[in-house]
Image (spheres, rainbow, N blue to C red):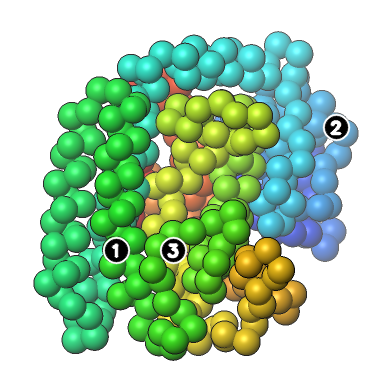
């Protein structure tokens, strides 16, 4: 259980929520594990199948405390709110901002600045940890180029130019991605980013990781009352969670990419755990996918210090923290959206 930004995060899979007077009581195995004054909370997000009592749900609705239920793996299930509460004002603001290119650019460029910053830090981490195994000059050039792009992003004024800078940064970053793979290059080599379908083992891993991260981001956005389908950088497209794709940009390098590199470099996944289908797509076998998901869930439990909040959280809560910060910015509580800058 973590109490952050006036939101109670209940991360134990067997936790059951109930109401005792004016307090939220969290129980595990019929024993009280925590107690929190309801009037101090603006939201509760539970990653448990056990659920909550109707009394607590009613009290949350009456006091305008958003109560959100997700699966233990982070999939959004439902969100309850009172008659006078809900998310209509927040979503109306989101839609207005999405229709205003200048305001959209203001939020999106912070997200892309975060992506470039984290991409550069990923490069620098490899330089630091494996200096003797890489072309340091090549890595240094990529790092300096991305550093320069960050300054360009700060100055940009349109989402179209921002997309161009993001594309340049991605090309520079992925140009050294193969060099960050340090073992079994015969089976785990990276030439370029390809998808729909992925045509090699590395891209199969990246696509699966990005899919999981996008789902986590969509769940995080829905849990705070935002519409995951209406983005600021990624434009509207039927069936696409555009705002989730926006939010995940800054998290790709530090969550998804580093996770894939860890799987490969630590020999946690093998070449014989992939197969090529008739359409040319490279996919993981069922056992490899199970191993991937288990490692992904374990990774989400690792603790980090949130760079803006300066509080320790599990990696898995990073999308939820960013979604909360984005909602606070849209409500006017924060002057700017603070991107996740990995340290």
Of labels 2 and 1, the one closer to you: 1
The alpha-carbon separation of the residues under discs 1 and 3 comes to 14 Å
Horizontal and vertical percent position of residue 150:
21, 43
The alpha-carbon separation of the residues under discs 3 and 2 comes to 43 Å
Q: How many marks?
A: 3
- What residue is disc 1 on? 175
The alpha-carbon separation of the residues under discs 2 and 1 comes to 56 Å
Q: Earlier in the sequence, mark 1 or mark 3?
A: 1
Circles 2, 1 touching at the beta carbon (< 8 Å)? no
- What residue is disc 3 on? 257
Q: Is residue 248 above or below residue 22?
A: below
Nearer to me, 163 or 320: 163
SS state under label 2: helix
Residue 206 numbered tag = none
176 lies left or right of 50? left
Horizontal and vertical percent position of residue 213:
56, 53
- What residue is disc 2 on? 55
Q: Earlier in the sequence, mark 2 or mark 1?
A: 2
Q: Is residue 213 visible?
A: yes
SS state under label 1: helix
């Amino acid at each position: 259980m973590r109490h952050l930004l006036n939101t109670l995060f209940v991360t134990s899979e067997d936790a059951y929520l109930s109401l005792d007077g004016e307090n939220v009581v969290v129980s595990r195995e019929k024993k009280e594990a925590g107690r929190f004054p309801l009037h101090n909370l603006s939201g509760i997000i539970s990653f448990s199948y056990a659920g909550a009592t109707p009394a607590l749900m009613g009290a949350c609705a009456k006091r305008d405390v958003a109560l959100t239920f997700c699966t233990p793996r982070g999939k959004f299930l439902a969100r309850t709110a009172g008659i006078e509460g809900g998310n209509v004002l927040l979503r109306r603001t989101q839609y207005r901002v999405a229709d205003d290119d200048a305001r959209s650019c203001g939020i999106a460029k912070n997200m892309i600045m975060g992506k470039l910053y984290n991409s550069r830090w990923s490069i620098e981490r490899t330089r630091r940890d494996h200096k003797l195994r890489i072309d340091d000059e090549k890595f240094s050039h990529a790092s300096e180029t991305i550093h320069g792009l960050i300054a360009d992003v700060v100055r940009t004024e349109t989402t179209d130019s921002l997309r161009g800078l993001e594309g340049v940064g991605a090309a520079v970053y992925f140009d050294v991605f193969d060099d960050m793979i340090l073992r079994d290059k015969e089976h785990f080599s990276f030439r370029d980013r390809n998808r729909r379908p992925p045509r090699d083992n590395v891209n199969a891993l990246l696509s699966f990781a990005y899919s999981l991260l996008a789902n986590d981001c969509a769940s995080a956005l829905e849990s705070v009352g935002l519409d995951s389908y209406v983005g600021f950088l990624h434009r509207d497209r039927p069936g696409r969670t555009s705002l989730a794709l926006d939010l995940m940009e800054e998290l790709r390098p530090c969550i998804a990419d580093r996770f894939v590199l860890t799987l490969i470099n630590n020999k946690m996944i093998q070449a014989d755990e992939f197969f090529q289908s008739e359409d040319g797509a490279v996919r993981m076998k069922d056992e490899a996918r199970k191993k991937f998901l288990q490692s992904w869930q374990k990774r989400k439990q690792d603790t980090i210090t949130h760079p803006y909040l300066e509080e320790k959280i599990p990696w898995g809560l990073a999308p939820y923290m960013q979604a909360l910060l984005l909602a606070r910015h849209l409500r006017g509580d924060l002057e700017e959206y603070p991107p996740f800058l990995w340290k």
